[in-house]
Image: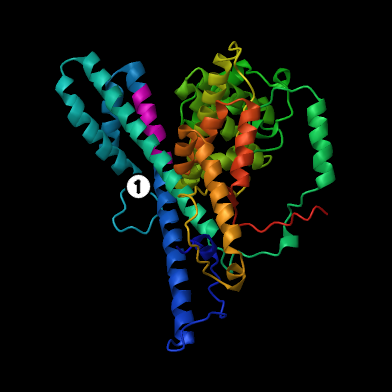
Amino acid sequence: MPLNYDKWANLELSDDSDIEVHPNVDKKSFIKWKQQDIHHKREERRSALKKLEIERGINAVLLPRVQAIRDGVHEHGPQVFSAEVARLGNTPSPDKPLTDAPGQPTYDEMMQNLFIQVWEKARVFIDDSEKLAAELISQLTKTEESVLHRNSAIADEIAAIEVEEGQKITSEGIRTGFDSSHVNKIGQEENKSQQQHSQPSQKSLEVLNPDAATNTPANTANNTADDLPSLTPSMATLARIPLRQYKALVELIAADKTLLSDVTTDALFVEAFNAGMEKKTTHALQCVNAGLFIQYCNKLGKDGLSLFMQRLTQAREAEAVFMKDVQDTHARIMERSAVLAEQSSSTNNPQEKEQIQLMSEGDTAITFDVPEGPAPENIILEGDAKLQQLDSETVKQWLNQRWSIFEAFDGELKQALSSNSLDNVNKYLANLPVSSAENIVKDLDTAGILNFSSSEIRDETGV
């Protein structure tokens, strides 16, 4: 039974002419066909990524508008919905996504079509204002959930494409190792590790916005809980302003210029975390919106407030980028705060312990190469000369060892590994004592089941 060496098929050097072909096959034609095939598949992946990014950008613009109308109906009744439908029909905006699609509908046209569908399902309660409002809220909430579900699916599709792209080592992506800024300093890392173990653990804030300024919550990992800023009355007012109400934000900031501070963004993000832990989704979203608005203004310098407001009002794509950042940051906060809330609720549990979790770094992907069974009786090594030089008995022993290690795992771990899902494996490890989880990770590594792959070439010589 031949062994499968498909994992070495990821090397794609489209300009490599060192290819062996059958004597009856024209070598130049074969190389040209191979190059064209590689470029064609690469363009297909890039085209798919572009379409998914456009769809995610459209959702980033439409979702806050759906949420704002739903909240308005909840607070003031069905007349908010009717007023928005009337506006869309009487004074529609010409703004639309920047795509090459013929007949691309505007944002307002898409909202109008959506509201028509919502109204068709809610109109049966037109004679009862309370029931009508409840049905409108229900339909708009379902729409929000549908968009969020689609955004999650888009993220998975993009991640899958990026993993596939990362597995293809092309001549375009090759960089000189010593040009990389990532160099492991073994001595420094050991000293750092010793210092961390010698110091008492401190409560820190999760990194959420890597592009934020130096003092934003994304970069205050060394702050203790006592150092985290709290909301002032002016900051609290900022946090109550709905999405897309930029004029209200500007008026409040203009009246209190002290709000143009990194501390304001920090405090608003902390408040967003607290709101997320209490499942106050809308409040958390408004905190993120105000916090990022302040941050963007600060990045633009002395006249940042007027410059950013000008960009938002004159370039629809600028607002789309901003709203996408708001939605993405809000999603990360809600996800992380849910984890923190769950951990907080179990602090009185005496069984609560540290956890071992597998984490990827940068563009590194973690996968699991699960053995399909024990080694066959007859092993045929196929491939290049080096592979054929391996001893078949040694390979057979190695395959049997892998299978024995895998078979020793319980059914739940086997199922998690077979799903090739890092989340499923981490979920299993989280329920184990640290020592048991460490042993499992060690066995996974010994059996060659745990794989790390990256498209980036790094210098890790330790110099």
Q: In the picture provided, is 169 more to the left or to the right than 457?
A: left
As rendered, which of 171 and 149 lies closer to the eye? 171
Q: Secondary structure at mark 1?
A: loop
**Dominant SS type (magenta):** helix
As rendered, which of 213 and 143 lies closer to the eye? 143
Magenta-colored span: 60-71
The x, y position of residue 113, in whole percent, is: 25, 40
Q: In the picture provided, is 125 more to the left or to the right than 76?
A: left
Residue 139 on the magenta span: no
Among the 4 quarters of the image, the one containing residue 254: top right
Residue type marked 1 = Pro
Residue 65 on the magenta span: yes
Q: Residue at x 18, y 15 (%)?
A: 128
Query: Counting other residues with Cα less than 10 Å from the Cα at mark 1, is it few (<14), some (14-19), or many (20 or more)?
Result: few
From the image, tell me which residue sits under label 1: 94
Confirm whether residue 300 shows in the render.
yes
